[in-house]
């Protein structure tokens, strides 16, 4: 639908397509979460392959005792995109979300926004999409079983993306809270995946070619110890996403070939926090672009130390922008002042009364 | 009005108040542009007085051959605010605006946005509000006549703010295009201001205690030459707002006491570009806070070298946020995903179908 908010009749130039949470869900349902994530993965792969064509900036954070608000901008010659995202762990105590987000995509040539969208759901989709994309280059061929340790909000998306993009058939789920695993199994009941709920992390990784860790622990934790991880596996480490938070024992990292998004960011936020600042890593974009090797042997342990980067959001925004014309699941916001005479902004305000009728009627 | 976009029934936490261009005009009309600007000026004065309590960041720019897109964030202990603004001079050739903007205000304690608003009109209001506020500290007492050189989109707001906050009664208007002056005079016809259209800048500044320059020239131009400016006047230099663009002859600057928002920004973007990097200036916030003197003599030439700063946008966002409950001129956006179980984001998408009905109906 393309409902427009009440407005006399500004030119179409004044309107910016808006995807509400409700319409994001409609878009996901319209094509299916798996197709959506595959599409986002394609855009991420395209964009990472031209990594050097982007203006890449570090996140711009604003810190409070309760959490952080970040702006994550990225741009190329055609588009400027940014995501607003917050992280406030204490929010759940008052029924609010720990993380929420929204984003904007604009044309570099005009500066006009072309898309304004919720990004809480979209971020979950793009994170899983890039995990599965990285695994296509890093996981053992014909992997069938994935262990997923931490069965929270991101775990469903991870399982579905790996099923769709890698052909995973079996999920071995573990969470410190059994209810979380039951929730995950219930949501995946009709997905075609066989979900086994496991009582321990050791049990979960039994026979898994891929180990996904996506716990919400906000401390230095050790979800996996060295002796648990056999040769040849791919570790998809999603959880570590801020300074002071890791999931893997340092010895595992030392046995692994580590792949990252933006090295300087991962060294601060990812599992890499535990290693020396000059520990060798491979940039994922180089693997996608064929400039660096992914998995090179059956015994190698590969590790994607995921923390999330602005270009993944940029790619997700581009994907949604291209998807909307076919689904029609968006609204239009009267966001940009568009006076007939650009020099007469005040005149537009002064005379809008006539076209709008009594403002009390609003 | 508080129309809500179609959505089953998410908690109020999912909604973010949105002020469209239409509703911004309704808000301005509801209380009047002069009252609105006086209110914004009060908030700017409050915020500048506690300057040191802000986390101040330089603008984050993304440059294209056609123009620039900037994010302007600022935060204190309570609020985070940012403005998105673009500047693309070539846009007018295709019927688009050179400058458009929107902004967001959020609670630092939760990271949740509390206001999303258009900022094209709001920026014009806050710019004039701060010009008049600065003039209260810098202009000759009992100033009655203001010359305004450059009669474009910002000029109306400047004249109204100076009438309301300083008691200006007479406007002497000059623009290189007479049509622009006629437009300004027409818009101010019922404002109570006496507007005289002048044929030259020299004519315009005749007898003026305050000289406002607000031309759109994108080059180094000399709107005022040294011999035109007598002692004792206050110069309100608004136009210079990017590197490579100035309005005043260097000799005028050398005779003036110069007041600025953020020195490092003004030295790059303002009239200050013409002077040595260490030329003494006074920070406006210190004048508002009583930590530095404004005008100290009748013969002194005071110059506000205005380029605009993020805290002014922060103050404007706070003002609108506090104004909305009384006017009701806003809508609510379904922007924040708010699943019943924070861990069940995918379940919310999966089961939203039932509550929303067939998504094709959207």
Image: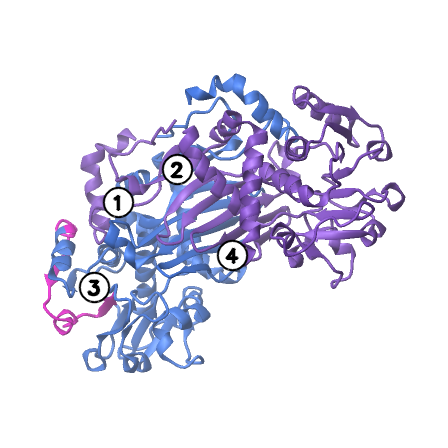
Chain colours: A purple, B blue
Disc 4 and disc 3: Cα gap in Å?
38 Å
Query: Where does the C terminus of chain A fall, quadrant-wise?
Result: top left
Question: Bounds of the magenta span?
Answer: B187-213
Q: In the image, which is nearer the foreground, mark 2 or mark 3?
A: 2
Disc 4 and disc 2: Cα gap in Å?
24 Å
Q: In the image, which is nearer the foreground, mark 2 or mark 1?
A: 2
The residue that label 3 is drawn on is: B150
Q: In the image, which is nearer the foreground, mark 4 or mark 2?
A: 4
Image coordinates for residue A139, horizontal then vertical, percent: 73, 42
Disc 2 and disc 1: Cα gap in Å?
30 Å
Query: Where does the N terminus of chain A fall, quadrant-wise?
Result: top left
Q: How many marks?
A: 4
Disc 4 and disc 1: Cα gap in Å?
45 Å
Disc 2 and disc 3: Cα gap in Å?
35 Å
User: The residue marked by circle 2 belongs to what chain?
Assistant: A
The residue that label 4 is drawn on is: A54
| 1 or 3: tag closer to the N-terminus | 1
Q: Are marks 2 and 3 in contact (CB under 8 Å)?
A: no
Give neighbour class at mark 4: few <14, some 14-19, many 20+ (Cα, 10 Å): some
The residue that label 1 is drawn on is: B32
Disc 1 and disc 3: Cα gap in Å?
24 Å
Image coordinates for residue A228, horizontal then vertical, percent: 87, 41
The residue that label 2 is drawn on is: A17
Determine the residue positioned at 46% across, 45% down: A104
Image coordinates for residue A332, horizontal then vertical, percent: 36, 35
Answer yes or no: are tags 2 and 1 on the same subunit. no
Give neighbour class at mark 1: few <14, some 14-19, many 20+ (Cα, 10 Å): few
């Amino acid at each position: 639908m393309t409902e427009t908010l009440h407005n006399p009749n500004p030119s179409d130039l004044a309107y910016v397509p808006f995807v509400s949470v409700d319409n994001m869900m409609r878009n996901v349902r319209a094509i299916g979460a798996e197709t959506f994530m595959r599409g986002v993965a394609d855009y991420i792969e395209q964009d990472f392959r031209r990594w050097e064509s982007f203006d890449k900036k570090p996140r711009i954070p604003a810190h409070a005792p309760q959490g952080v608000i970040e702006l994550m901008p990225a741009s190329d010659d055609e588009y400027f995109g940014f995501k607003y995202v917050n992280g406030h762990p204490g929010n759940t105590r008052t029924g609010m979300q720990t993380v929420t987000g929204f984003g904007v995509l604009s044309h570099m040539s005009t500066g006009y926004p072309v898309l304004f969208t919720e990004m809480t759901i979209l971020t979950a989709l793009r994170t899983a999409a890039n995990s599965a994309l990285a695994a296509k280059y890093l996981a053992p061929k014909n992997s069938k079983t994935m262990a997923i340790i931490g069965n929270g909000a991101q775990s469903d998306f991870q399982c579905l993306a790996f099923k769709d993009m890698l052909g995973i058939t079996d999920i071995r789920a573990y969470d410190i809270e059994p209810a979380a695993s039951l929730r995950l199994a219930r949501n995946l009941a009709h997905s075609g995946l066989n979900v086994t709920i496991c009582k321990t992390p050791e049990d979960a990784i039994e026979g898994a070619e891929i180990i996904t860790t996506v716990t919400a622990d906000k401390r230095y934790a050790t979800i996996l110890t060295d002796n648990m991880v056999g040769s040849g596996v791919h570790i998809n480490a999603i959880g570590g996403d801020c300074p002071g938070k890791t999931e893997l024992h340092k010895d595992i990292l030392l046995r692994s070939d580590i792949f990252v998004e933006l090295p300087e960011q991962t060294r601060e936020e990812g599992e890499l926090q535990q290693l020396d600042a000059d520990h060798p890593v491979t940039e994922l974009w180089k693997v996608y672009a064929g400039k660096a090797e992914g998995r090179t042997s059956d015994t190698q342990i590969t590790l994607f130390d995921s923390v999330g980067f602005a270009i993944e959001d940029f790619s997700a925004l581009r994907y949604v922008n291209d998807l909307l014309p076919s689904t029609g699941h968006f609204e239009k916001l009267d966001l940009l002042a568009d006076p007939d005479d650009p020099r007469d902004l005040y005149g537009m305000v002064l005379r809008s009364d006539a076209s709008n009728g009594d403002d009390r009627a609003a």
